Image (spheres, grey):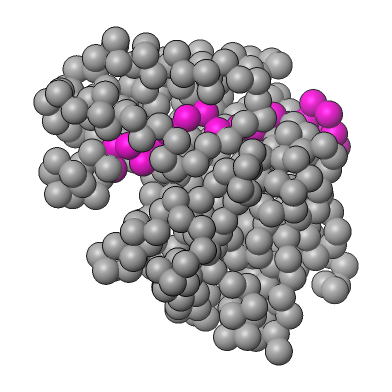
Amino acid sequence: MLNSGPVTALGAMSGTSLDGVDAAVVVTDGVTISSFGPTAYRAYSDAERGVLRGVLGRWHDDDVAQAAEVIETVHAQVLSGFENIDVVGFHGQTLAHDPQDRGTHQAGSGDVLAAVLDVPVVWDFRSADVQLGGQGAPLAPFFHFACGRFIGASEPIAFLNLGGVGNVTYVDPSYDQPEEDGALLAFDTGPANAPLNDLMRARCGVEIDKGGALALSGTADQSIVDAFLSDRYFAKMPPKSLDRDSFSQLSEAVAELSDADAAATLTACVAQSVSQGCSYFSTAVAQILVCGGGRHNAALMQALAQAVPARVVPVEEVGLDGDMLEAQAFAHLAVRVMRGLPTSGPSTTGVRGAVAGGTLSQPS
């Protein structure tokens, strides 16, 4: 058990965009953020990324076991570069997410990392929530609540993460605890970078539309966007969550468009699904703080500014690190798990009551 008061926690995140592993230190007692510490990033090699991409959507077989070894090895390389760490929060790599049926699957073992790093590791953050009827995602909202307090927010704000999938957290900092009814609302807004990255890889042989340059040169097909928004997912009340490939049909929808128009159309789908999601907020927010790789995409940020009834800015404008926010979230959540504090609740994942998820692995 951790000592009382703030401790030094190290979080790691490997997102659905499969770019690499983010690692970040947070000094926190699990409630209040005292400070942020050093960060690190390790990109996946093409070979490693190929192994991981090859098992997306799969659950348990020999290839999945090989992917788990890649995850563990890369994480161990990144995390071993930090010193004086009290606890590690290890998310692993989501391969499949089906909370209504089969559950959720993050590859990688906290037991392995605890033994290698000789530090307690909290992992498997999502399973308990799913087993109790929740979506198991998103899990960053309780951290977003602490961030709202850290930056001194006095009015409701929203955090928008644009990774492979988009997710948003509405935060009302006037509440005392994140598990209180009304303090948070969180859900996946729709696909974000995943369809765009898949398009660029298939058509252009590159991983991303860097800066949104291709999308900026094209024109969105609004009929495709409208058909996308007619999917029943968008009419479903939150909380709700998606798998990386939940909207894989988008690739077929833009198949006949030029590269530029296809990129512009997929970008518009992301922005307008976020706008639709904002209609679920109990109170309009004046500001949406964007984190994740999507905030570097000028086409996407412009489309959001036009579609969303709020000021859309990167989280760096309030002194946060948009590349590391999710890794920092799992550092903060690891401390909450160690101290028996909730990590999700009805308004963030739809679980029946507040849940302290996560599995603790101690060093051997």
Q: Quadrant of residue 176?
A: top right
Task: Inspect the magenta stretch and tell me whether residue 348 lies in it.
Answer: no
In the picture, the quarter occupied by the N terminus is bottom right
When the figure is inspected, residue 46 is found, relative to residue 179, above or below; the finding is below
Q: Residue at x 67, y 52 (%)?
A: 126
* Badge count: 0
Of 320 and 218, nearer the camera is 218
Of 198 and 41, nearer the camera is 198
Q: What is the x, y in percent for residue 98?
A: 57, 43
Q: What is the x, y in percent for residue 14?
A: 47, 58
Residue 278 visible in the displayed image: no
Q: Quadrant of residue 261?
A: top left
When the figure is inspected, residue 14 is found, relative to residue 42, above or below; the finding is above
Give the left or right position of residue 92, taking residue 282 as reference: left
Q: What is the x, y in percent for residue 237?
A: 65, 20
Q: Quadrant of residue 303?
A: top left
Residue 91 visible in the displayed image: yes
In the picture, the quarter occupied by the C terminus is bottom right
Q: Residue at x 73, y 66 (%)?
A: 359
Of 52 and 86, nearer the camera is 52
Q: Residue at x 37, y 14 (%)?
A: 227
Task: Inspect the magenta stretch and tell me whether residue 194 lies in it.
Answer: yes
Give the left or right position of residue 362, taking residue 224 as reference: right
When the figure is inspected, residue 116 is found, relative to residue 295, above or below; the finding is below
Give the left or right position of residue 78, taking residue 356 as reference: left
Of 334 and 28, nearer the camera is 334
Q: What is the x, y in percent for residue 210?
A: 23, 42
Residue stretch in magenta: 174-197
